[in-house]
Image (cartoon, rainbow, N blue to C red):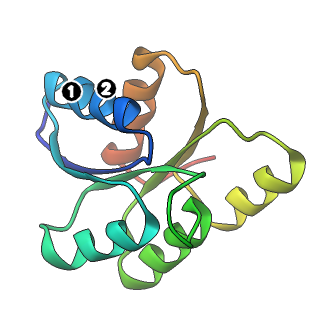
Amino acid sequence: MTGETILVVEDEGLIALHLSEMLEKAGYRVISPAYSGEMALRALETSPKPDLVLMDIGLAGSLDGIETSRQIKKRSPVPLIFITAYTSENMLARMREAAPAGVITKPFDDKDLLALIGKAVSGPATL
């Protein structure tokens, strides 16, 4: 792998830990996971700029993952992949408005997520 830096935004501790370990094993650098939208925005100010953000939709705090991603994109054009258990048409429409590099639904296969990440960090998003 090429060692890109990834910010994981996930409010469920075990999932955040699993994602971090899986990404590190695949050769990525992982910024300490953020558990809320507010934490993610702070991490962007204090950490090296990530090459990709993995964003859960349902987060602790007042910002959901979609609103957090909009605020991130205002600050930096970093590619973003949504991880979600929500697949309602309304939620999918809100996700599309945020122009993610991809969306993966829980439960997901690690290989599928790594393939999606590989595409997102290697070039412009094509949805």
Q: Residue at x 41, y 45 (%)?
A: 120
In the rendered structure, the answer to whether residue 38 lies left or right of residue 93 reads left
- At 35% across and 77% down in the image, what residue appears? 76
**Depicted 58 relative to depicted 107: above or below:** below
For the point 13% across and 29% down, the residue is 27
Residue extending furthest toward the right: 89
Type of amino acid at the residue the image marks with label 1 = Glu
Residue closest to the eye, 76 or 38: 38
Identify the mark at residue 7; answer none if there is no mark: none
Above or below, 126 relative to 62 = above
Residue 29 at x, y percent in the picture: 13, 43
Left of 45 or right of it: where is 15?
Answer: right
> Element at badge 2?
helix
92 or 15, which is in the foreground? 15
How crowded pointer 1 is (Cα within 10 Å; few <14, some 14-19, many 20+) is rated as some
Q: Looking at the image, is 2 positioned above or below residue 110?
A: below
Residue drawn at x 12%, y 67% as measured from the top left: 48
* Residue holding disc 2: 18
- Kind of residue at disc 2: His
Which quadrant of the view contains residue 3?
top left
Quadrant in which the N terminus appears:
top left
Task: Identify whether 114 is placed above or below 42.
Answer: above
**Residue 79 picture location, percent across and down:** 41, 58
Q: Residues within 10 Å of mark 2 (few under 14, many from 20)?
A: few
Image quadrant assignment for residue 119: top left
Q: Is residue 59 left or right of residue 85?
A: left
Q: Residue 108: horizontal and vertical position, in percent?
A: 54, 21
Between the C-alphas of marks 2 and 1, the distance is 5 Å
Asked if the residue under mark 1 is in contact with the one under mark 2, i.e. CB atoms within 8 Å, the reply is yes
Residue assigned mark 1: 21
Number of numbered labels in the structure image: 2
Name the quadrant containing residue 23.
top left
